[in-house]
Image: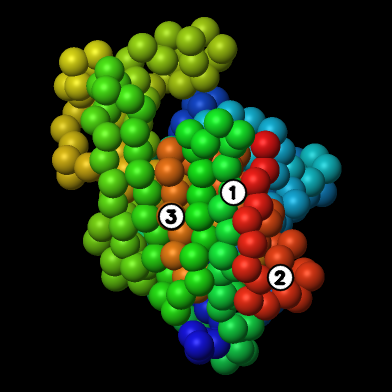
Amino acid sequence: MPEARCQRTIGRAVKISGRGLFHGCDVRVRLLPADPGVGVVFRRVDLVGRPEVAADVRNVAPGSRRTILCCGAAVVETTEHLLAALAGMGVDNCIVELDAREVPAVDGSCLPFCEAILAAGVVSQGVKKPEPMRLPLQRIGDPDGSQWVECIPGSDFVVSYRLDYGPQSPVPAQSQAFAISPDVFLAEIAPARTFVLESEVEALQAAGYGRHLTGSDLLVFREDGSLIDNQLRWADEPVRHKILDCIGDLFLCGHEVSGRIVANRSGHRLNQLVAEVLQVHVANAETDVEGFLRVA
Ligand SMILES: [Zn+2]
C-alpha cells in the first residue's frame, strides 16, 4: 500500500509572466504558499473582490483544447500546464494569483513553471496527506472506442499514453509511459510543448484564438511533418505533452492516486471525466471496486 506523506507547499512567493496561449492577454502570475488543506486556488486579482476558483473538477467549464475553471466571476483558462507543474513537482497547496483570465503559455510546456517552483522551494508542512487513492479498475471512453482511459490498480503512479491521429497525420503515432516522480516529471515530461497542426491554425485564428502566436511559441506541424520555426526536444515530444496534460487534468480530482493510467487518444474533456469519476469514487468511499464504466 502506498504510504501517506506530509502535505507540501512552496517556500516563498514567485512570479511568472507572459501571454495567454489562446487569448494572447498579458498576464502576471504570482505563486504563493498556502496552508495545509487549501489545495490549489486561483485568485483573479484584476477583478473586484479578487474572486477565487479552486482547482477542482466540479469547477470545470466547457471549452475545447484547454481546461477552464470557473466559479462565479472567477474564470481562469488554460490551467492544465500550471496544474501539471504543481502536481508533477509534488505541490499540494498553492495560491495562484493572476491579473488576467488566462495562465501564461510560457514556452508551450510547463518547464518554466517547474523552474519557478524549484526557485521557491518545495517545503513539507508537517501535516499528513490522505493516503494515495488506489485507482479503481475501470475504463472510460467514447461510444466508438476511439478514445479511452483505463485505470488499473497498482502501487506506483504510472501514466501511459497512445497518440494516434491516423496514417495521414503529420504527427506520427507514438506511445510513451512514465512512473511519475518529481525527478522524472522534470526531466522527461515538463519540457514537452503543446502542438497544433498548420491545417488547424487558420480555423483557430478565425475563431479568435492564438492570433499572436508564431511557430516558435509552440510546435506547429506542417502537412509533411516538419515544424514551422522550431525543433523537437524529443522525437516523441507530442505524446510526452499529452502525458503532461493528463497529469494536469487528473490533479482536478483532488486526490493523489496510485496505479496506472492508460490513455488512448484522450483529450482534456475525457481527462476531466476521469477526474470526475475518481472524485466520485472517493466520495463514495468505495475500495477495490472492480467494474467497467463507459461514459458517452
Ligand atoms: Zn497541453
Q: At 57% from the left edge and 91% from the top edge, which residue is drawn?
A: 126
Q: Mark 3 points at which residue?
A: 262
Relative image position of residue 21 (x, y in whole percent): 47, 31
Residue at figure coordinates x 65%, y 52% from the top left: 293
Q: What residue type is labelled 2?
A: Val
Callout 1 crowding tier (Cα within 10 Å): few <14, some 14–19, many ≥20: many
How far separated are the C-alphas under marks 3 and 1? 10 Å
Left or right relative to 231: residue 185? right
Q: What is the total number of numbered labels drawn onto the structure image? A: 3
What amino acid is labelled 1 in the image?
Answer: Ile
Q: Position of residue 18 (x, y in %)?
A: 44, 38
Tell me which numbered mark, 3 or 2, is placed earlier along the sequence. 3
Expressed as whole percent of the image width and height from the top left, the position of residue 89 reads: 41, 68
Above or below — where is 214 with respect to 219? above
Q: Choose between 192 and 158: the one closer to the eye.
A: 158
Pick the quarter of the image with the C terminus: top right
Mark yes or no: residue 224 visible.
yes
Q: How is the image coloured?
A: rainbow
Q: Residue 140 carries which label?
A: 1
